[in-house]
Every structure is written in structure tokens, then in C-alpha cells.
Image (cartoon, rainbow, N blue to C red):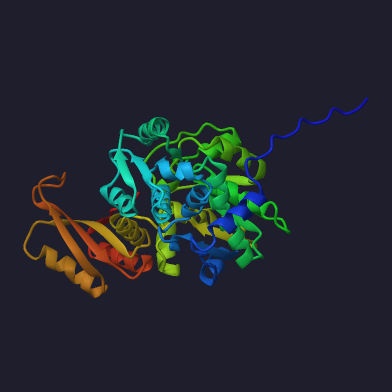
Amino acid sequence: MATQAAPARTPLSISLADVRAAAERIAGAVVHTPTLHSKTLSEMSGAQVWLKFENLQFTAAYKERGALNTLLQLDDAARAKGVIAASAGNHAQGLAYHGHRLGIPVTIVMPKPTPTVKVTQTEGHGASVILEGETYDDAYAHARQLEASNGYTFVHPFDDPRVMAGQGTVALEMLADAPAIDTLIVPIGGGGLISGMATVAKAADHPIEVIGVEAELYPPMYNRVKGTNLPAGGDTLAEGIAVKEPGGLTAQVVEALVDDIILVSERSLEESVSLMLQIEKTVVEGAGASGLAALFTYPERFRGKTVGIVLTGGNIDTRLLANVLLRDLARSGRLARLRIRLQDRPGALYQVAKIFQEQAVNILELSHQRIFTNLPAKGLSLDVECETRDRAHLERLIAALQTAGYEVRPVELA
């Protein structure tokens, strides 16, 4: 009896030829960003780590590639009418910048709560910005309405073969500059970047494993591939990959070509943003640090491999970056807040301060609490924010305070 033939698989929406054509199309108009070996990260992880610095694009993110590849394929009529997109992030800026450069009108619809800095940055690249609705879905729906009524061309941030092919040029450059790479760690939001990169990787002349990374708070592609039903939502540092529903076209590519998807925590994202600044002296946003977060969350998985990591973007609010860096200092013990129980009497603060001086610990801030406390009326709670050399130095300070008879405990971060 003849074996029944397996049903033919639906062809994927992009091919290696599409990515190569995109590379020729956008050459010279986007930065061929460096792919550099990190000696320090390699020593820390046990892998050979290569970093692709897409945060060095003009708009500080890889999204320019797919946007430009799409714009360059529009006919004259579509160029004249202009394009539209719904985005409050890097896609908006990449489309705005290259649309303005090519003389193509660009309209971006953003939710009303979008931070003013993102609106002004996008307008600064020459786009018209419309604020509509409270959520991305509201903005997206309005953009599609304007597309229909005004004859605009809608440029999807990820679920478009032209966008996917443009993003895939990241992998072409990485493998040309670091041909020994055998593992790619790629952030996943809607899936445009990993679709393009996996298309290139799986056509390489040697086996390359492609691992996707999502934030734990936003695991839609993980759910689809793994058959799980984890919730998607919340306030993540990796806002660039905070997508509730992956693309239909991108999901097909991911299911066919991506080897695995892993999740990373908010804490690991914070630590990775800080680590990139400390070690590589470069600023990355939360999504841009997710590949590094995966490397250090699952070190045994990547040890001994030659790993390529894409630093997808560097657009992070400066105040948020400051908070991330300070929180990392606190977790490492270099910044601390100690809560010390004192008696409310003259000289009490002086005696505590002497111990800080003896231990060579710098006091940054003091805060007394006499009223809102469950201590006796003659007691008070003193919070001391201080700076130490490391965790061991902090522990010596705490031990010295306890030896002197003080009740003390650190105020811990989440």
C-alpha cells in the first residue's frame, strides 16, 4: 500500500531572495551598523558574544530598514498620496524619517496617552501626527479608516513581507561581519525582525540556531508556538516588544524556521540595560537588551556557542534610564536604604553617623519618622540612604550597627 503524501506546506511570505533584494534597495540609506565581539560579555557568559549595534541607526533603531524597503517599492501614485501607520515607537520614527527624505507624505496615528517626547520626535522627522483613542488598537483602527478614506498606503510595523524582508538585512550584515555565528538571539514583538533574520539564518552555509525572546509580560508568540495561554499585559520595560497579538504572516515564518522562544523577566531586562551601559558604554532600550537578558537568564543553553545578539534600539526615556541604573546599583549593594530604630534623644543621630564614618560609608540622605510608626512615643525610625563599595561593604556596615546594639534592616527592592 502506497504511503499517503504529506500535504504541501503553504509557501512562506518571504525568501532569502527578498531579503537580498531589500539589502540592495536600502544600501547607503541606512547605516551598516557594526557587529563587534564583546570580550567581557564572552568571559562572563562562557559564550563567544557578538553584538549588532542597531541603536546606531539615525533614528536609533532597526525599524528604518523595513520602513524604507516598503517605501521604495511604492509606485508614483502611492508616493503622491502618502503613507500612514499606527505607532508610538521606533516604526513611526523610521517611517517618518525616510518618508520625509524621499518626499513621501507620512501620517502617524498615535494613542492620546503617548508621551509628548515621542510625538515631537516623530513630528521632527517630518510626519503629521494624529492623536486618536486611548490604546494602540484605537489608533490602529483610526489609521485603517484614514487609509480607506484618503487613499493612503498603510505600512504595518511587522506583518508585511516588505517590512519583514527589510528587517532581515540585519542578519545579512551580521553573518557577513561575523561568519562564525552559530546562534542568533532575536527579540520578538510582532515578529517582523525574527522572521527576516530566520529566513537568512536558515539559508546559511552552516547550521544556525534561531532563538526568539519575549518579555514575560507579553508572550503571545510563545503562547502560539508552545500551545500555552499565558496572559499578555502589564507595564514592561521592553515596550518595543510589548505586542498582544503577533502577526499572521510572521507567525507562519516563526513556526517554520525559529528553533525556540524563551521568556525573560523585568528584572533581567533592567539588569541588561545597565550592563550594556557599564560594559559596552552604549545605551539600549528595554527591548534592545532582551537578547542579552536571555543570554544571562539561560547561560547553560548558550555556553560554548558563538552567539549573535541584536541591540535593536536605543530609544529609552532618560528619566527611566536613570531609574534603571539606580535600581541596579541598589540590587548590587552599592546603594542602600537602611531602616534603623533609634531612641529620640540628643546625640542619637551623631552616634549612628560615627559608625557610618568608621565604616567609610557615604550618607546620601536621611529621613526621620516619628509619627507614622508603631514604635513607642520615645522611639523613631531613621531611614539612611547610603553609598557603599559593594555588597560585602554594606554587610560589614550592617554588622557594625548591630554590634553597637541598633535594630537595622535593609529596605529591599522588588
* In the depicted structure, whether residue 146 falls above or below residue 160: above
* In the depicted structure, whether residue 169 falls above or below residue 108: below
Whether residue 374 sits left or right of residue 401 in the image: it is left
**Looking at the image, which is closer to me, 173 or 194?**
173
Q: Quadrant of residue 254?
A: top right
Query: x, y percentage for residue 249?
Result: 58, 37
**Looking at the image, which is closer to me, 61 or 97?**
97
Q: How many labels does the image show?
A: 0
- The residue most toward the right is 1
Whether residue 100 sits left or right of residue 170 in the image: it is left
- The residue most toward the left is 346
**Looking at the image, which is closer to me, 254 or 389?**
254
- Residue at screen point 33% across, 40% down: 110
Whether residue 105 sits left or right of residue 343 in the image: it is right
Q: Quadrant of the N terminus?
A: top right
- The residue most toward the top is 1
* In the depicted structure, whether residue 356 falls above or below residue 9: below
- Residue at screen point 43% across, 48% down: 91
Query: x, y percentage for residue 358?
Result: 23, 74
Q: Can residue 83 be seen in this view?
A: no
- Residue at screen point 34% across, 35% down: 135
Whether residue 373 sits left or right of residue 91 in the image: it is left
**Looking at the image, which is closer to me, 277 or 25?**
25
Query: x, y percentage for residue 279?
Result: 44, 69
Query: x, y percentage for residue 119?
Result: 30, 48
Q: In which quarter of the image is residue 79?
A: top left
Q: Can residue 404 be seen in this view?
A: yes
- Residue at screen point 25% across, 64% down: 386
